[in-house]
Amino acid sequence: MLVHKISQLENVKVIDDQEGIVEAFVNSMGQPDSDGDIIVPSAFDSSIEQNMPVTVLLGHDPSKVVGKVLEAHAINFGDSAKLYNKIQFNLDTQLGRETFSNVAGGFIKEWSVGFNIPEGGSEYETESDDTYRVIKDLDWVEVSSVIRGASPETTTISAKAEPITEVMEQPSAAATDEQPIISDAWLPVTDEQRAQVRDAVEFRSRLLGLRLQQKQHESEKGNTNE
């Protein structure tokens, strides 16, 4: 069964809309969400290595593909972590252009990740009389821009296009079932954090290249033995 985890947007910074590229934190990890789940920061690692580029949808509708995830990495924030995404919207389609405009302008306020949990990928733990499902491994299928949500504290960091503008909005109790989000809980990503993401992506690319070379070598060796 495909699991969806939705996250609240808090601020939007627009830099350049010509490329349709957005940087965003699309999921919170290391803390309970409104479903009583805790996703460990390393849960997305195998999917980032094997499933990229992950598809971006509108509202989890597989018929509404609006872009793809170019880069992804977990960034630690003290006791919690956020899933960083670099997303490119497909500006060659009307739906892609409209979705990018809505995200960059703050009209769509939440992200949601869709994933499957493999056998043995989760377990239940009890803490202070509360029981949580701890998700340690998952199969990440897609990320969607959506209207409403479950995973706390996400944000669009930047959308590549014009001078910087910000949209800061606190969700009302009527608009969400979640606890109020403190507006300064999110700060714009720093140059150091961007460098961390780039280094991680480059390392994963080199590692994947080495594994592909190893598999090719083993295949050629097997053919020689035959």
Image (tube, helix red, strand yellow):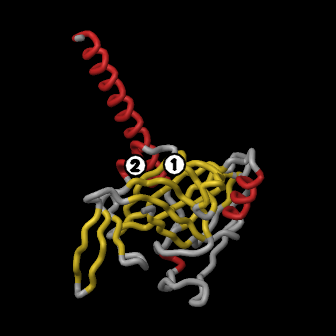
Q: Residue at x 49, y 83 (%)?
A: 178
Q: Is residue 165 left or right of residue 144?
A: right
Residue occupying the point 26% across, 10% down: 224
Three-letter code for the amino acid on which mark 2 is drawn: Ser
Residue 181, image x and y in percent? 50, 81
- Kindly give the residue lying farthest to the right in the view shown: 94
Q: Which residue is mark 2?
A: 47
* Residue at image point 47% right, 51% down: 72
| In-image side of 117 versus 150 (left or right) | left
Q: Are marks 1 and 2 in contact (CB under 8 Å)?
A: yes
Identify residue for label 1: 54
Residue 31 on image: x %, y %: 35, 73
The amino acid beneath tag 1 is: Val
| Location of residue 64 by image quarter | bottom right
- Give the CA separation, mark 1 to mark 2: 9 Å
Residue nearest the viewer, comparing 59 with 192: 59
Asked whether, in this view, residue 160 is left or right of residue 81, the answer is: right
The residue lying toward the viewer, choosing from 199 and 142, is 142
Label placed on residue 170: none
Expressed as whole percent of the image width and height from the top left, the position of residue 77 reads 38, 66
Q: Is residue 76 above or below residue 94?
A: below
Residue 60: x, y in percent?
58, 62
Residue that appears at 72% across and 58% down? 163
Task: Give SS at disc 1.
Answer: loop
Question: Left or right: 177 with respect to 20?
Answer: left
